[in-house]
């Protein structure tokens, strides 16, 4: 399980625009550490908007032109739009999201792979599976490798609120791994966080016996992979 660096929004933009001074520092870090796959995480803009999509495109072009030719780049989670409720509901709401996803094709062309979110917003696993299969289908319209982003915790906006930040049951996370393996080209595991009562977000202490990790190890071993990070 190789590590993939993620450069977050505060390191990439200032206000409403790409910050080229910050980007120069990110580019220098990529070169110094010889990163081969890099994720850029900017969630502030709407990539389906004709006014805001060019900001993403300028950012991608600036980085692409300055990192080594063999460095692969992508954007976190904005293509296709991660509209859980609309994908589960289907019908007109899904049709609208599909029209929004189509508008992002020019930006997707600048990415080496597409990274849709596989986040869990509720405990209903049938709904989650419908969402996951739909968002993978949407990701395929861009004709790029698809790498869903798996998070072994319930999303910050999960309902009911009591689920938020809770670790997923092991069997639920195994289902996510299996669907990613079935439908995608690869997968990325991220997490985990603890949200304190004052809103502070901290990295959780490692627990080698956590159900999500035990299921991940079993999954990897079944696929002939070693369960270790490099």
Image: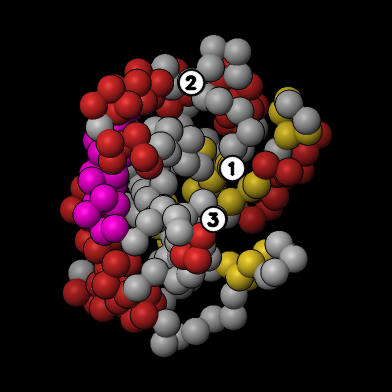
Look at 34% across and 61% down and name the residue there: 123
Residue 59, compared with residue 27, is above or below; it is above
Look at 74% across and 66% down and name the residue there: 198
What is the C-alpha distance between the residues marked 3 and 2? Answer: 23 Å
What is the C-alpha distance between the residues marked 2 and 1? Answer: 16 Å
Main SS category, magenta section: helix
The numbered disc on residue 156 is 3
Nearest to N terminus: mark 3 or mark 2: 2
Q: Position of residue 54 (x, y in %)?
A: 59, 17
Q: Is residue 195 visible?
A: yes
Residue occupied by mark 2: 48
The numbered disc on residue 153 is none
Say which element carries label 1: strand
Left or right: residue 116 versus residue 75 is: left
The numbered disc on residue 41 is 1
Numbered disc total:
3
What's the magenta region? 124-143
Q: Is residue 128 magenta?
A: yes
Q: Position of residue 118 (x, y in %)?
A: 37, 51
Q: Is residue 188 visible?
A: no
Q: Position of residue 119 (x, y in %)?
A: 41, 53
């Amino acid at each position: 399980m190789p590590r993939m660096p993620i450069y977050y929004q505060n390191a990439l933009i200032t206000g409403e625009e790409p910050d080229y001074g910050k980007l120069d520092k990110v580019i220098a870090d990529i070169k110094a550490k010889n990163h081969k796959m890099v994720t850029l995480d900017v969630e502030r803009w709407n990539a389906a908007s004709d006014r805001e999509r060019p900001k993403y495109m300028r950012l991608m072009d600036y980085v692409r032109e300055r990192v080594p030719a063999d460095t692969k780049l992508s954007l976190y989670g904005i293509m296709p739009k991660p509209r859980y409720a609309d994908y589960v509901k289907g019908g007109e709401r899904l049709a609208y999201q599909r029209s929004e996803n189509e508008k992002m094709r020019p930006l997707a062309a600048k990415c080496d792979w597409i990274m849709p979110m596989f986040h869990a917003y509720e405990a209903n696993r049938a709904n989650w599976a419908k969402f996951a299969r739909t968002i993978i289908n949407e990701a395929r319209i861009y004709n790029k490798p698809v790498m869903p982003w798996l998070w072994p915790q319930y999303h910050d906006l999960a309902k009911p609120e009591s689920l938020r930040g809770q670790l997923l049951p092991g069997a639920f996370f195994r289902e996510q791994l299996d669907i990613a393996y079935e439908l995608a080209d690869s997968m990325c595991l991220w997490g985990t966080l603890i949200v304190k009562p004052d809103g502070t977000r901290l990295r959780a202490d490692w627990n080698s016996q956590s159900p999500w990790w035990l299921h991940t190890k079993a999954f990897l071993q079944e696929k002939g992979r070693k369960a270790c990070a490099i």
